[in-house]
């Protein structure tokens, strides 16, 4: 893999132990300027991951803690009257930052959720009649507690679709956990991280990632996958063309991280669960779970060659 | 017990179809079975709603036990068709209570098709066929529903789909119906032999034909090749009754008649006594089942070509097998004839035989008329004149007669039906030594101009006589025509018009409204439709099929036809199979993929098959893990494949991949040896 990326992964990995795959997925997502949703229990390292990424990628970083009484103005910013200039001055909200961590997004009301999600989609904010662009690059890493926990407002499917990927961190394995327990405070490690890329390099990487070759055979495989979601009875509905595009670009980006000049089926399979799980719903399950099982079906039932 | 739930649509249609399929049988089923069926359906609905759970093993055993006991008590026997159909239906419904898996659902559905079929053992008319078609659509809807996900919640959509499916298959149904070789059944079930059927019997007692005329059931339909003779000439001869025991008339002892005239045997000597004159009338008769052996024909028939039928000495047809299903036979008759011109003395004796005792007044009456008559012809005419002139009444409600029935009828009551007139006429003839006999059958019928056939119903039953005369042989004399000529010309209904007795027990019979024109029109249309159905669908027997096919395809062998059907069916299947398989494996595969899959098969033979969702890199890694010795070859093949297929996008260039595979094979060979 490209040296810069290798270094990035190593640095983030030194904070978030034993989660190389998830770190790579997060990078894949960021290389595409896509927004990332991390869904897991509290205390699994969601915040640490995003903080480390911001630090290593040298991005301005803001964290918004979502609560049930959060208002859109708390995210976007507000105009305040200033005595000195006898004028209203706009105080930009935490959204005006290159990497925004929207923590526990599903704890807030839909109104505030949609303020964030609109900003994500438009990459600009319109307040009091003035449109203000958001800084570039602009990433949102949102974290979400599992929907079954108390005090959550589940995101509707249409808004889940705005996230390019959804990942789960999961418990660390025994070795990583032992290091974690024995080692120093993660916060201190975080402080020591040095940026490995600048914004310019990051943009170059993004351009390079788009150069990865996709063959007809691979497109066939992606189409077979998409077709399966649309035809098999266990799927409540199939993947949208946007979902198919997301799958393709993520595969490309993953192949780039893997330092390949072309995409192979394994790349598609590596990103597939993160890309499709939150976009699919099992026909027999109206609660919206079951995406994981469906992604596994796709991986085992759809022939790679054919 | 698994968590499988039959989808709502499927269960709804399953229950609906089940009810519809069982409904026509319900009149034949014992109450206990009906109650059991109802209870099972209720239980299944409760299971679906989650209120009750499936019954345990012992409950089911109990159900089966009491179900069978109920059937036994209800039918009184386990012989015959009905109890077994009842058992099938009971099991069909009980199966509902153990639908744990999808497979059980299929069993119920297949049983449904089967139970639908059993209805045709009883009824084969158009209404039932249409009804069964609807049932089959419902069962098919259940079958479709079973394969739908739970998100399909609208049963009507499923029904529509099933209807479209079945309508699409109608052309195939017709082709198979017409062309598929009809094989005679390998075994037969005794069909309703116990069911009493109305029809002409072989005994004639005063009153029993009058009883027959209370029925409007169809006896047979006769289709004429040319013009239909006038109704008054249509005497459908059925039986000849020549033995009189003082009360009833019965057939001559069969042994006295000698050999029958059959198509497969040389004609017996008595056949020479038949002289057929005048124009021939060609017609075919489609006889309803009678559970008897005799057949009906217009006087006077030639022989027949049909196997299993013979002409009896008294010139009527006899079937060697009881007629339990519709029977079609073709005949040629001559309305003018001369039969038995010379009557042997023995037969003269038999045909003038009367009981010594009884009916003395009638005998005296006969003698007094005989004394007045110069010759035999004049005597016959005088007797008929007496019927005509005196106050004889033709009625469907004759009084009950005592021991000397002929005396009482001729001299006291003078009210009677055709059998009274025929019986007493023959009695009067025989008293003075003229050979005479009673003939029973049907007279007239109703002409249906839409289908160009004559429809004969039970109330057309009739009895008349034949009198032997020197030089002329047997001459038909119908004493009824002397009393009520309108019976012969227009039918029974007009002969008893004032009496209001015609079908008095059937207030809603179509036949009572013959004067209402539009009703008659509808009735004739329906009747014609049903006739076509009977002759071309129900009556489409192996022989009819062969003659029909012979007309269009020339003479063909049934075996040959079967072979052609089978081979074309299988070749059609083969084409479909090739289409499906080819699509999967060869037509759409890229050359490079084909080569790579061949390579995978080589490895599969070594116990390392590639799973469906496994990409080439993962596969190679897995193979190398188990077989480190294959690592270089695996790497070579996989790299080449990935390069050509995914990096260079050149699926046509298989050369280097083939080379890599050859290298692998060679190395493998070396390692093995």
Image (spheres, grey):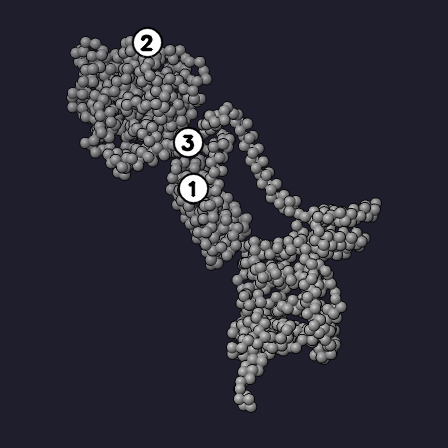
Please tell me whether mark 3 or mark 1 is closer to you in this view.
3
Answer with left or right where residue B498 lies relative to residue A4.
Answer: left
Of helix, strand and loop, which one carries label 3?
A: helix
At 22% across and 19% down in the image, what residue appears?
A: B359
Of helix, strand and loop, which one carries label 1?
A: helix
**Quarter-of-image position of residue B587:** top right
Q: What residue occupies the far bottom of the structure in this picture? A: A84
Res. B633 in view: yes
Answer with left or right where residue A196 lies relative to residue B176.
Answer: right
Earlier-in-chain disc, 3 versus 1? 1
**Quarter-of-image position of residue B119:** top left
Please, which chain is the residue tagged with disc 1 on?
B
Mark seen at residue B342: 2
Up/down of B88 relative to B560, above or below: below
Picture coordinates of residue B440 (x, y %)?
30, 23
Please, which chain is the residue tagged with disc 3 on?
B
Mark seen at residue B132: 1
């Amino acid at each position: 893999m490209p040296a810069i990326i290798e270094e990035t992964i190593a640095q983030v990995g030194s904070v978030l132990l034993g989660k190389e795959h998830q770190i790579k997925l997060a990078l894949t997502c960021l290389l595409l300027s896509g927004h990332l949703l991390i869904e897991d229990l509290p205390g699994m390292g969601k915040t640490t991951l995003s903080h480390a990424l911001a630090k290593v990628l040298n991005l301005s970083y803001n964290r918004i803690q979502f609560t049930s009484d959060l208002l859109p103005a708390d995210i976007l910013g507000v105009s305040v009257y200033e005595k000195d200039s006898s004028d209203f001055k706009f105080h930009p909200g935490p959204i005006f930052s290159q990497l925004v961590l929207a923590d526990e997004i599903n704890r807030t009301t839909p109104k505030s959720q949609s303020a964030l999600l609109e900003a994500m989609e438009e990459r600009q904010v319109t307040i009091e009649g003035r449109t203000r662009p958001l800084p570039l690059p602009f990433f949102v890493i949102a974290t979400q507690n599992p929907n079954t926990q108390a005090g959550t407002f589940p995101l509707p499917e249409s808004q889940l679709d705005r996230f390019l990927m959804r990942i789960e961190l999961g418990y660390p394995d025994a070795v990583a956990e032992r290091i974690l327990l024995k080692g120093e405070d993660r916060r201190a490690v975080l402080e020591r991280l040095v940026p490995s890329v600048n914004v310019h390099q990051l943009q170059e990487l993004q351009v390079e990632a788009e150069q990865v070759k996709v063959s007809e055979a691979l497109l066939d495989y992606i189409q077979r996958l998409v077709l399966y979601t649309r035809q098999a009875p266990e799927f409540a509905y199939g993947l949208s063309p946007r979902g198919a595009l997301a799958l393709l670009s993520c595969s490309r980006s993953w192949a780039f991280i893997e330092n390949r000049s072309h995409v192979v089926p394994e790349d598609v399979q590596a990103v597939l669960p993160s890309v499709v799980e939150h976009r699919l719903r099992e026909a027999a399950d109206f609660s919206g779970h079951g995406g994981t099982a469906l992604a596994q079906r796709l991986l085992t039932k759809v022939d790679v060659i054919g | 017990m698994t968590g499988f739930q039959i989808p709502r649509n499927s269960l709804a249609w399953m229950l609906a179809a089940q009810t519809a399929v069982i409904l026509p049988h319900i009149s034949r089923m014992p109450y206990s079975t009906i109650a059991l069926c109802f209870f099972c359906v209720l239980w299944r609905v409760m299971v679906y709603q989650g209120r009750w759970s499936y019954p345990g093993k012992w409950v089911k055993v109990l159900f089966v036990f009491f179900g069978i006991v109920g059937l036994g008590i209800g039918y009184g026997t386990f012989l015959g068709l009905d109890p077994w159909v009842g058992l099938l239906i009971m099991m069909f419904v009980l199966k509902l209570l153990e639908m744990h898996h999808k497979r059980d659902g299929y069993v119920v559905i297949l049983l449904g098709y089967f139970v639908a079929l059993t209805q045709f053992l009883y009824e084969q008319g158009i209404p039932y066929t249409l009804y069964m078609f609807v049932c089959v659509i419902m069962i098919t809807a259940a079958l479709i529903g079973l394969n739908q996900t739970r998100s399909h919640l609208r049963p009507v959509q499923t029904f529509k789909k099933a209807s479209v499916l079945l309508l699409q298959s109608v052309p195939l149904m017709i082709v198979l119906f017409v062309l598929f070789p009809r094989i005679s059944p390998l075994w037969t079930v005794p069909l309703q032999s116990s069911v009493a059927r109305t029809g002409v019997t072989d005994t004639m007692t005063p009153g029993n034909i009058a009883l027959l005329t209370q029925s409007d059931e169809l006896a047979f339909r006769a289709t004429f090749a040319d013009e239909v003779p006038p109704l008054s000439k249509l005497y459908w001869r059925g039986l000849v009754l020549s033995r009189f025991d003082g009360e009833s008339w019965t057939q001559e002892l069969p042994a006295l008649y000698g050999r029958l005239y059959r198509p497969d045997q040389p004609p017996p000597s008595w056949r020479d006594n038949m002289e057929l004159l005048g124009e021939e009338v060609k017609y075919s008769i489609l006889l309803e089942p009678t559970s008897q052996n005799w057949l009906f024909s217009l006087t006077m028939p030639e022989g027949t070509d049909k196997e299993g039928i013979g002409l009896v000495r008294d010139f009527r047809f006899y079937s060697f097998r009881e007629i339990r299903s519709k029977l079609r036979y073709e005949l040629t008759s001559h309305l003018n004839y001369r039969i038995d011109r010379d009557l042997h003395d023995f037969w003269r004796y038999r045909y003038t035989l009367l009981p010594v005792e009884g009916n003395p007044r009638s005998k005296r009456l006969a003698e007094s008329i005989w004394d007045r008559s110069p010759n035999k012809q004049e005597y016959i005419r005088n007797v008929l004149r007496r019927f005509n002139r005196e106050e004889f009444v033709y009625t469907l409600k004759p009084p009950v007669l005592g021991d000397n029935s002929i005396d009482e009828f001729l001299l006291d009551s003078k009210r009677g039906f055709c059998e009274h007139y025929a019986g007493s006429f023959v009695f009067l003839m025989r008293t003075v030594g003229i050979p005479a006999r009673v003939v029973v059958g049907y007279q007239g019928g109703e002409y249906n101009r839409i289908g160009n056939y004559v429809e004969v119903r039970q109330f057309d039953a009739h009895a008349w006589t034949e009198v032997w005369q020197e030089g002329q042989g047997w001459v038909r004399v119908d004493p009824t025509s002397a009393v009520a000529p309108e019976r012969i010309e227009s039918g029974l209904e007009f002969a008893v018009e004032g009496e209001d007795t015609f079908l008095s027990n059937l207030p809603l019979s179509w036949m009572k409204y013959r004067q209402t024109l539009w009703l008659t029109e509808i009735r004739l249309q329906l009747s014609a439709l049903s006739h076509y159905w009977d002759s071309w669908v129900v009556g489409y027997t192996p022989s009819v099929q062969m003659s029909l096919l012979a007309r269009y395809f020339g003479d063909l062998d049934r075996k040959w036809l079967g072979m052609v059907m089978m081979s074309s069916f299988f070749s059609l299947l083969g084409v479909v199979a090739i289409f499906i398989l080819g699509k999967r494996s060869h037509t759409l595969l890229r050359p490079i993929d084909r080569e790579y899959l061949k390579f995978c098969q080589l490895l599969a033979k070594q116990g390392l098959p590639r799973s469906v969702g496994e990409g080439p890199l993962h596969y190679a890694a897995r193979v190398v893990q188990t077989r480190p010795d294959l690592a270089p070859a695996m790497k070579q093949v996989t790299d080449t494949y990935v390069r050509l297929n995914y990096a260079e996008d050149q699926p046509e260039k298989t050369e280097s991949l083939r080379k890599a595979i050859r290298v692998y094979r060679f190395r493998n060979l070396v390692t093995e040896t």
